């Protein structure tokens, strides 16, 4: 994680935001393009979009209760595929919203949708697949992950 | 050019909380390799700055097969998978290989060139249009029709 200050801010602020459902959650973060996000073309570097998607994941993990579940179970999230399509450049100091949605799952992976918006206009969008992995048990099926989050939330 | 690849030693800054290389670092390594490759065919950053254009990506797709750990050396290569005859649109494919030769990830990027004044897509300057075909071609290389 190269966005250490933005990550730190999320770790402080996300626990105080409204909780998200642990099944098919959707979240949004309002961001601004900072000078260290730019490349020599003076727009946000393509690699940065992927790192920003990581921030939305962390926010979602915290707000759904998955972060707490993963800590308790010693699970870890792993991204297995990521595709981004860039439509319009993000300029220096431009404000944008990044939206993430868990759109579904199969017996192994969660499917995620990522959308970068300036106002109502989509400037980039993508999909990713991720798994929850345990060193002891390998990949944890998504349904079991969601059931465990539910149990831990009920116990709290 | 038969092959173009670089070895990277995975640094502390490339790691994530799972103690393996963070997924966006793969894209950073590939971007670095592409810049070196363009320089190798005569299209360096100074020339691009002089002509006021630069590369821009439309799409990136990465699939991860194996994790890469701290201190490991990962080899990254690049091949041209698709291009227009004038080099104005292109697709590069990168393969990331671990020290044991196994594939860690495969990245595909689609892109073009952008005029940095008008912020619009532009053609590759005529003097570089053939240079792009010096880049190693993938086995499934496809020459698009010029629109």
Image (tube, coloured by chain):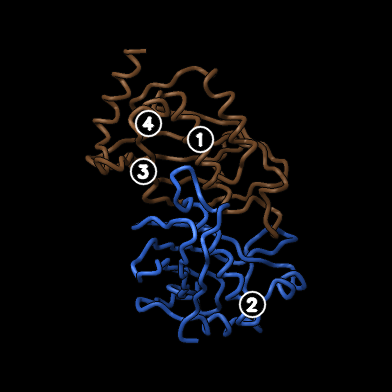
Chain colours: A brown, B blue
The lab-note entry on whether marks 4 and 1 share a chain reads yes
Is disc 4 surrounded by few (<14), some (14 to 19) or many (20+) residues within 10 Å? some
Nearest to viewer (mark 4 / mark 1):
4
Seen from the viewer's position, the closer of residues A147 and B142 is A147
Disc 2 is attached to a residue of which chain? B
Q: Which percent across, then down, holds residue B90?
A: 50, 70
Is disc 2 surrounded by few (<14), some (14 to 19) or many (20+) residues within 10 Å? some
In this rendering, is residue A71 above or below B128? above
Locate residue B7 relative to residue A68 in the image: left or right: right
In this rendering, is residue A43 above or below B3? above
Circle nearer the N terminus (4, 1) = 1
Query: Residue under circle 4?
Result: A70
Query: Residue under circle 2?
Result: B39
What is the secondary structure assignment of the residue under circle 4?
A: helix
Disc 3 is attached to a residue of which chain? A
- Which label belongs to residue A56? 1
Circle nearer the N terminus (3, 1) = 1
Q: Which percent across, then down, holds residue A67?
A: 42, 29
Q: In the orientation shown, which residue stands out farthest toward the left?
A: A107
Q: Looking at the image, which residue is at 58% across and 52% down? A: B13
Q: How far apart are the two marked residues, 3 and 2, measured between alpha carbons?
A: 35 Å
Disc 1 is attached to a residue of which chain? A
Disc 4 is attached to a residue of which chain? A
Q: How far apart are the two marked residues, 2 and 1, measured between alpha carbons?
A: 35 Å
Q: How far apart are the two marked residues, 4 and 1, measured between alpha carbons?
A: 17 Å
Q: Which percent across, then down, holds residue B53?
A: 69, 67
Circle nearer the N terminus (3, 4) = 4
Q: Quadrant of residue B99?
A: bottom left
Query: Residue under circle 3?
Result: A130
């Amino acid at each position: 994680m190269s966005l250490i200050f933005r990550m730190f801010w999320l770790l402080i602020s996300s626990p105080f935001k409204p909780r998200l459902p642990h099944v098919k959650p959707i979240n949004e973060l309002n961001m601004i393009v900072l000078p260290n996000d730019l490349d020599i073309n003076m727009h946000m570097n393509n690699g940065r979009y992927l790192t920003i998607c990581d921030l939305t994941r962390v926010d979602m993990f915290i707000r759904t209760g998955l972060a707490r579940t993963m800590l308790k179970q010693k699970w870890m999230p792993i991204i297995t595929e990521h595709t981004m399509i860039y439509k319009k450049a993000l300029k220096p100091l431009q404000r944008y919203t990044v939206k993430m949605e868990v759109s579904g799952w199969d017996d192994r992976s969660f499917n995620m949708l990522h959308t970068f918006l300036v106002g109502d206009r989509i400037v980039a969008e993508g999909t990713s697949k991720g798994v929850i992995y345990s060193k002891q048990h390998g990949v944890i099926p998504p349904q079991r992950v969601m059931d465990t989050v539910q149990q831990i939330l009920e116990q709290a | 050019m038969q092959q173009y690849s670089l070895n990277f030693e995975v640094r502390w800054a490339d790691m994530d909380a799972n103690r393996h290389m963070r997924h966006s670092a793969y894209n950073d390594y590939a971007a670095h390799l592409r810049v070196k490759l363009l320089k190798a065919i005569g299209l360096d950053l100074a020339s691009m700055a002089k002509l006021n254009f630069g590369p821009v990506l439309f799409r990136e797709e990465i699939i991860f097969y194996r994790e890469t750990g701290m201190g490991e050396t990962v080899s990254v290569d690049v091949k041209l998978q698709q291009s227009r005859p004038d080099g104005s649109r292109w697709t590069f494919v990168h393969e990331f290989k671990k020290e044991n030769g196994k594939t860690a990830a495969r990245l595909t990027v689609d892109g073009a060139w952008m005029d940095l004044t008008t912020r619009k897509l532009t053609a590759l300057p005529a003097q570089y249009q053939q240079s792009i075909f010096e880049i190693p071609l993938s086995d499934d290389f496809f020459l698009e029709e010029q629109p």
